[in-house]
Structures are given as C-alpha cells and as structure tokens.
Image (cartoon, coloured by chain):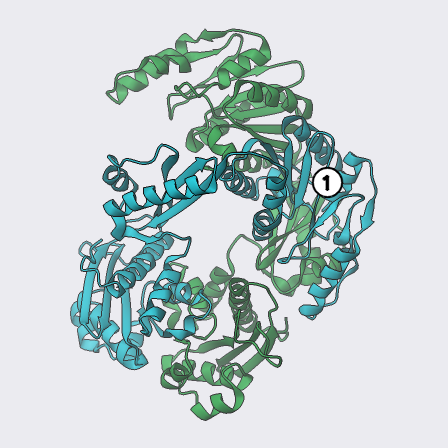
Chain colours: A green, B cyan
Amino acid sequence: MPLAIISIGDEITTGSVVDTNSAWISEFLLEHGMETRLHLSVPDDLRKVSRALRFAQTQARIVIVSGGLGPTVDDLTTEAACQFLGVRPVLNQHALDMIESRFRAIGREMTNNNRKQAMIPEGAELLENPFGTAPGYVFATKRACFFFVPGVPVECRRMIEHQVLSKILAREKGKKIFRPLILRTFGLTESRLDQSLAELELPRNVRMGFRAVFPEIQIKLIASGKTEASVVKALSRAQAAIKEKVGQYIFSENGRSLEQVVGDLLREKNRTLAIAESCTAGLIAKRLTDIPGSSDYFLAGFITYSNKAKTDMLEVPGRLIQEKGAVSSEVALAMAEGARSKAGSDMALAVTGIAGPTGGTAEKPVGTMHIAIADERGTWEKKLFLLRAERSQIRELAAQTALEVIRRRLLGQKNLEF
Amino acid sequence: MPLAIISIGDEITTGSVVDTNSAWISEFLLEHGMETRLHLSVPDDLRKVSRALRFAQTQARIVIVSGGLGPTVDDLTTEAACQFLGVRPVLNQHALDMIESRFRAIGREMTNNNRKQAMIPEGAELLENPFGTAPGYVFATKRACFFFVPGVPVECRRMIEHQVLSKILAREKGKKIFRPLILRTFGLTESRLDQSLAELELPRNVRMGFRAVFPEIQIKLIASGKTEASVVKALSRAQAAIKEKVGQYIFSENGRSLEQVVGDLLREKNRTLAIAESCTAGLIAKRLTDIPGSSDYFLAGFITYSNKAKTDMLEVPGRLIQEKGAVSSEVALAMAEGARSKAGSDMALAVTGIAGPTGGTAEKPVGTMHIAIADERGTWEKKLFLLRAERSQIRELAAQTALEVIRRRLLGQKNLEF
C-alpha cells in the first residue's frame, strides 16, 4: 500500500522547524506494512498546497497531509483541499460541538476564528481530535484516499494511531507485514562491510542496506511477509547469516548504544572501571556516565592533559614522557596502569594521541592515537592512525574505538584489531 | 530566487532518520534571500528519484538534491540524474584523484565501488568534497539549476556553505542583501528575554526573533537592504541597543561557542584552569578541550565520580563527605580547592550534583547542583536547582552554567547569579 506524506507550513520550508511528523508517520505505518514513496513539504500557500495534493495522488494511493488546520488566517489547508476537490467548505456541526465543549472545559471563550476549524470539505468524513481544537478529515478521490491531520506532533500522532490506521487497514485485504532490524557495527568501513556481505544469501523477503551514522555503520534489514511468524523467522535467519560473517563488529542488535552495552557488560561481570584520557579529555567518561546508574561500575576519570598532570596524577615517570613522548605506547600503558592503581578499579583504559589540528609531526601525524588497557589479565596496547579532517571527528573516533576495545576485552575476544 | 530541496534515501522515507538537511539548507539560504517552495524526499529508487527531479524543476529555479552519492549499490542518485538528463555517467578524473589521495592519506585501500563515486553525469560540473569521498556536482537544464550534494550532514552543509552558495549568488543580479547576526545568551528564559527587549526600538530593516537552542537562547537579527554598508550599519545599531539591555547575558556575538569564549579569555589573561567534575563527569572538560590549542590553558580534569575518588584524588576529607554529603557546598568548595592545588592551576572549577533519574531526596532532589570556583581571589560557591526531566539535560545545563560562571568570573562581573 504505497503512501505519500505532505507536511504543510511556512515554518517547515523556511527551516525554522524540522519536520519530524513525516519520519514518525513513515516509521509507524511501515510497521503495519505501508511503504512511503514520498515526503513533500510546502508553505502555507493555496496554489502550492493544491499542487502538492495533485502530485501526491499520482504517486501513492494513501496520502497523509499534516498541518495548516489551525484557526488563524495563514492556515489554509482546508481551502486548498476544497479547491483541489472542486467542492465548498461546509460547517460540520459535530466538529463545532466538540470545539465548543473543549473551550467550555478549559474555561475560555471560543473566538470566531475557532469556528473556522469546524469547516471541512463537503463530502469529507470527520476525524475527531480529543487532544486539540483542530479536527481532521478524510476523503477519497478516484486515485487516492486523503487523510488530513493536525500539524502539532502529539495531536498528529494520536490521530494516526487511533483513527487513521484502522481506516487504512480496513481498506486493505491480505496485507503485507513489514519489520525492520538494525545491527550496529564498528570497525569496518561501509564498503568493506558491503564486500564482506556481498555473497551472503538472504531470505528473499529481506532487504538489506547500510547507513553510516558516524562513527558507526549500521546494517539495516527490512523483512516483509504475510504473517508475523514468517517475517520474524526471515529476520532472524538473516541476522544469523550476517553475524556469521561480521559478528565481531556488531556491538548492538537491540538499539542499545555502545556505552550502554559496555556498562551492561561491566555490571554483569561485576567489574569496575577507571579511565585516563589525554586527547579525548573527558569524552569517554562523559559517554560512560550518560548512562543512569553508571556509578555502579565507573569509579573515576583522570584527564591528564598536560605532561605534568600525567606525572602528578598517574605517576607516569617524567623521564618516560621525555624519552618516548606523551603520545607513545609506553606512556599509554603507564597511564592505564596508573589509573588502575590510583582508582583501585578492576580495569582501566587510557588514551593518548594527537587530535590536531596542530601538534602533528612526520613521525606522529595528527590522528596518531594510543589506546591501552590494564586489567587482571595484564596489559594490552594498540597504536592507531585516525586520519580525519576534523579534530572533533578524531576525538569521537578515538572514544568510540576505546569503548569498543573495552567491549571486546570484556567479551574475551582475542582480536582487538581495528 | 525560488528553491526546491530533494532528500534521497530509504532511511528518510522509512522514517528511520529525520531529514534535518532540508531544514538546515532552507534556513541557511533564506538568510541569503532565497525562499524554499518545496521539500521532497524519495527512496533510493531510480524512477522515484527521476520523477522527483522532474517535478522539482516545475516548482523552482534552483534545486538542491542531497543523498544517494555513496559507494554502495543502493546509492543511485547519479544514475537517476543521468536518466533524467538523458546523458551517460562519465568518469571525472579529478574526482577520482581526490578519492584516491583521500584513501592514500588514511592508509587504506580503495575498493572498486569507491570508483563509482567519481562518475558524474556527462556535462556536469564537479563540486569538491574535502570532508568525505563523495563529490557533488552541478548542472543546469532549461528550467532549473540542480546542485547534488552528499547526504552526510557535515559534508552536505560544508559543500553548501563553501561551494553552492557562491555559485547561486553568482547567478543573481541586483538582489536585496540579507545579513543575519546571532547573539547567544544564557541565564534568562526566552520569555524574560522577550520582556526585557519589549520596548526596544530597532531600525526598520532589522527583524528580531528568538530561538531556543538548548541550553542557550539565541537572539536572531536579520537585516535587509540594498547595500552592504546600510545592512551592516543597521545590524550594529540593533546590536548596541540589545547589549544595553541584556549585555551581561550575551556570551557570544560572533558565532563563537561558550567554550571558545572561555578559552580565549583564559589565554588573553594568561590563566590556567583545572576542573573537578562529579555528576557532569567529563562533559565540561570535553567541551573545553573541543577547542584546538586548549592545552595552552587547560591543565587537568579530575572526574571524581565515587566518594573514594573525591578523597583519593582531591583530598576532600572523608568526614566532610559523610557529614555534609557528596552534594553540598562544602564538598564542592573542597573539590575546587583540591583541584587547584593538585593541578597547580591559577583557577579551578568544581561541580557536584544529582543528575538523576535516581538518587534524589526530598532535601536534595534530582537537579540539585553545586558549582564552586577557587582562584587567587578566593572561593565562590552557588547552589542551583536545574529542574529538568532528563538526565542528559540536567548534565548539559550544569556544564553550560559552569562554563558561564568561569566566563563571568574572568570578566570580573560581580553578578554571578543565575
């Protein structure tokens, strides 16, 4: 059942508001088997709205239109709908009663322009709005069925959930079910992931795509089928096949963030953690403590930005820094060991590197990064080159890599390479 | 100069990503006098993309198309553009060189599908992408000029700012000039700001608006006129009038972030800083070190998440924590003094509080926050109630308040209230 969504409002086309309704409607209706072919946004302008309605019905059989049903002069969606249909706006007594009783309930006087909201195109069917004054309505042309809903996000969503969905489903027979699944990966580029999965055999009713959401790459699956059971089965077969190829790079299969996954692992294994950060300077600790309850496992962070701080706070020998440089394997290891011993934690992670834009040399260019771990199994260390243009990207990538190192270490994965 | 914007990608029409590019592009180009008539989003589908291109050129003279320029099989914007134009995709040698050198720089091998990104429609002009592998391009039909840019937000925005804008402006003659100016404030709510500026007299060609960009409130001015000089003059008159009323709350008039402003002040006054964080746990240090060159003034951060860490790392007496609680004026002051003495910095700031969602009590509800400063002038301390629903918002607000406290302290402002 192909779908088009139109959002109406100057606030959207001027960019002062981001249109979140369209994404919400698409995602919600996709779960019920409807596929969106088109999002369209136009300003509060009679000709542009009716042109959008005409275009939409050439693209989809269901069209959902949000916005422009308010009481003020710039709300002219109903006028445009009437023009498009070639009918008059008529007063809907039930709508007027609802608006009046709503105003009585909140003890306010109804203004004349609220009356305008009770006018709907002749022949349209009313959709009640229990959460606001603007009712919606539905009408069908030969080509498509149009649902008009308020633009206020909560009113829009409730009307779709409680009224529009059932009316759409009633029009369908033997409809298809769609279910999405997202596998979040880190450590492979999008094209290497694509290549690794190139020869994968997926159930025919599963579509796979990739999405780069810096710094991770997501594998997105959408399964479709006639029954819930067939869709779930296809998805889990696809999921298993993908995990067989690139499982070690998948850090989340259920929407949880990397810091949540790491936190859950620490709690599950009853381990505590301390962090020593130089170039990331708080970013890793900040992400770990974004999670409520992180005080169960996160004890302390040492932001040793200057060399002196590395020595004072973590007892990294001054001579070691002089000989090897603050950005070196030796200093990273000493930072991790220092953090573990100072905080008295089971595990400690240290990061030192050059985030740029200045400070790089031929031998240690901007993006050079050392990550070290100290725990009861001993120490581990890795040098990376995170070659990105932006300081912020280098720092985010370093933090993501560090969290992923902790995850793989906690899982006992031998391959800690990136 | 009417504008249409097309976003391409299954992730948008399935609703898994909210299209923020279109709003950003509209807002940015509106500031330069261009009005968006249409936003359009379609899936990665050849026919739907070319149909969208055809429709857009009937609605606008400038069309900006983002997304679908990546290396994988589902990226088919260029193929659709070729179909629409009736031309072949051709290899652009300069684009290929750029992609290759980008891969060389990061020491990775280029895969064959990255080569695909160097193919652009025959006759199109290349737009370089210094921030990613996907170049953009521009071509004109009889009806409209089309700009193709990457969908990754940072790459999309940079290409519009640095390349697309100048090309659009070059096509125009004798147009009105628009110039925006944003004054960034913190410490007053939007409605108090509105009230404070209610009786302000502004030049007639200056429009003023407010925008809440959590956690700050921005005062947005847009001046229009025929000449650069008239616009600049009107803007600076408006700016002066606003500063007279609410100047102390304005932390930035030139786009710089609060952490940049604080960093510049520290450098200018030749002062060094250390930070002790409990509930913000790295967030303040992270923001300060987002700024390149922050090692000039930022020495160290102590993330004393546990009580033991407060005592071990900052010598906050264990008895003080027991008697007054970790979230108290006394402990905040002891943390600031400890950080200053341990790091040997001129100034130290400490934050301790309850970010929630749990841990609050009747006396110290979630959102209770203590901020303390220690410097050569002595100490200063303030208790705040940051009443927000979300842990992340409480932490962000605490970090913003702390940075603003440093700013006002460095400026010698007596009023450190919020």
- Relative to residue B352, is residue B230 drawn left or right? right
Identify which residue, B8 or B374, lies in the foreground: B374
Which of A166 and A316 lies nearest the eye of the viewer? A316
Residue, x 60% and y 62% (percent of image)? A186
* Rendered residue at 33%/74% (across/down): B272
Tell me if residue B255 comes above or below residue B226 in the rendering: below
Q: Dot 1 falls on which chain?
A: B
Q: Depth check: give the residue in front, B374 or A231.
A: B374
Relative vertical location of residue A3 with respect to residue A252 in this rendering, above or below: above
Mark 1 surroundings within 10 Å by alpha-carbon count, few (fewer than 14), some (14 through 19), many (20 or more): some
Quadrant location of residue A166?
top right
Left or right: where does residue B131 sit relative to residue B415? right
In which image quadrant can residue B350 be found?
bottom left
Name the quadrant of the N terminus of chain B.
top right
Residue A15 visible in rendering? no
The three-letter amino acid code for the residue at tag 1 is Phe
How far across and how far down the image is residue B217, in percent?
34, 46
Spot occupied by residue A412 in the image (x, y as percentages of width and height): 57, 74
Q: Give coordinates of residue A73: x percent, y percent.
A: 41, 18
- Above or below B263: residue A254: above
In percent of width and height, residue B160 lies at 59, 47
Residue B278 visible to the viewer:
yes
| Residue at image mark 1 | B139
Count of numbered tags: 1
Q: Residue at x 24, y 68 (%)?
A: B373
Front residue of B215 and B346: B346
Q: Dividing the picture into quarters, in which one does residue B365 lie?
A: bottom left
Furthest-left residue in this view: B323
Instruction: Tell me the SS state at disc 1.
Output: strand
Residue visible at 30% across and 81% down in the picture: B344
